[in-house]
């Protein structure tokens, strides 16, 4: 089974959770494209990075989710940061330098986020609707959110759409 990003549920609400995510490392590619194309455009660079191996010449295990993030609500709609989460316990210092200049390594500290899951293909229309719903639910609970939005996909694209598991994750302030 594919390793998943580590978190603890702090509180459950109707329609979403507040989670505390453990620190993690990301391999990330910035892409200028619409949401539907961004993941595909970044995937090859990210997959080649984990395939090149770590400093001990071992391939880096594929983990879940693959994250497509917009760093600010008012950012250009075609600016996406697509990331692979590195295996738990990895630090940027442990990771090999990328051969591809588009791949950037980043360390995330522990952080509190809200999250809501859904099944089905995470296309642009569904994603926009789910993000708006999640932000509205958080506002009703007076939870302050950052401008960043993450669409987290856990399944390969060849899995039937109805069976795909996804999450919307938004850091809190």
Image (tube, helix red, strand yellow):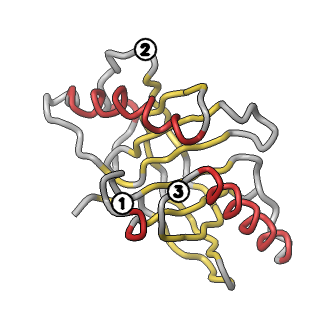
Percent from the top left, x then y, of residue 19?
58, 69
Q: Is residue 24 left or right of residue 149?
A: left
| Residue 4: mark | 1
Element under disc 3:
loop
Q: Is residue 86 left or right of residue 21?
A: left
The residue under the point 54% across, 75% down is 9
Q: Earlier in the sequence, mark 1 or mark 2?
A: 1
Percent from the top left, x then y, of residue 25?
43, 41
Residue 67 against residue 2 in the figure, above or below:
above
Q: Earlier in the sequence, mark 3 or mark 1?
A: 1
Percent from the top left, x then y, of residue 64?
37, 54
The residue under the point 54% across, 41% down is 36
Is disc 3 in contact with disc 1, using a CB cutoff of under 8 Å?
Answer: no
Dot 3: within a 10 Å radius of its alpha carbon, few (fewer than 14), some, or many (20 or more) residues?
Answer: many
Residue 104 against residue 19 in the figure, above or below:
above
Q: Which residue is mark 2?
A: 101
Element under disc 2:
loop
The residue under the point 48% across, 51% down is 23
Q: Nearer the viewer, residue 60 or 126?
A: 126
Q: Nearer the viewer, residue 84 or 78?
A: 78
The residue under the point 85% across, 76% down is 140
Dot 2: within a 10 Å radius of its alpha carbon, few (fewer than 14), some, or many (20 or more) residues?
Answer: few
Q: CA distance from mark 3 to mark 1?
A: 18 Å
Q: Nearer the viewer, residue 8 or 156?
A: 156
Quadrant of the image occupied by residue 34? top right
| Residue 122: mark | 3
Is disc 1 in contact with disc 2, using a CB cutoff of under 8 Å?
Answer: no
Element under disc 1:
strand
């Amino acid at each position: 089974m594919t390793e998943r990003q580590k978190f603890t549920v702090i509180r459950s609400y109707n329609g979403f959770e507040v989670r505390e995510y453990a620190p993690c490392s990301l391999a990330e590619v910035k892409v200028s494209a619409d949401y539907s194309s961004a993941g595909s455009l970044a995937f090859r660079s990210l997959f080649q990075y984990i395939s090149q191996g770590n400093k001990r010449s071992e391939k880096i295990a594929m983990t879940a989710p693959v994250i497509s993030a917009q760093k600010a609500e008012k950012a250009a709609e075609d600016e996406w940061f697509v990331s692979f989460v590195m295996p738990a316990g990895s630090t940027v210092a442990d990771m090999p330098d990328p051969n591809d200049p588009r791949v950037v390594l980043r360390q995330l500290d522990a952080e509190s986020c809200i999250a809501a899951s859904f099944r089905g293909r995470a296309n642009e229309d569904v994603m926009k609707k789910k993000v708006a719903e999640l932000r509205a639910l958080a506002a009703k609970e007076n939870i302050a959110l950052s401008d960043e939005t993450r669409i987290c996909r856990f399944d390969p694209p060849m899995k039937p759409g109805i069976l795909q598991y996804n999450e919307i994750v938004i850091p809190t302030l």
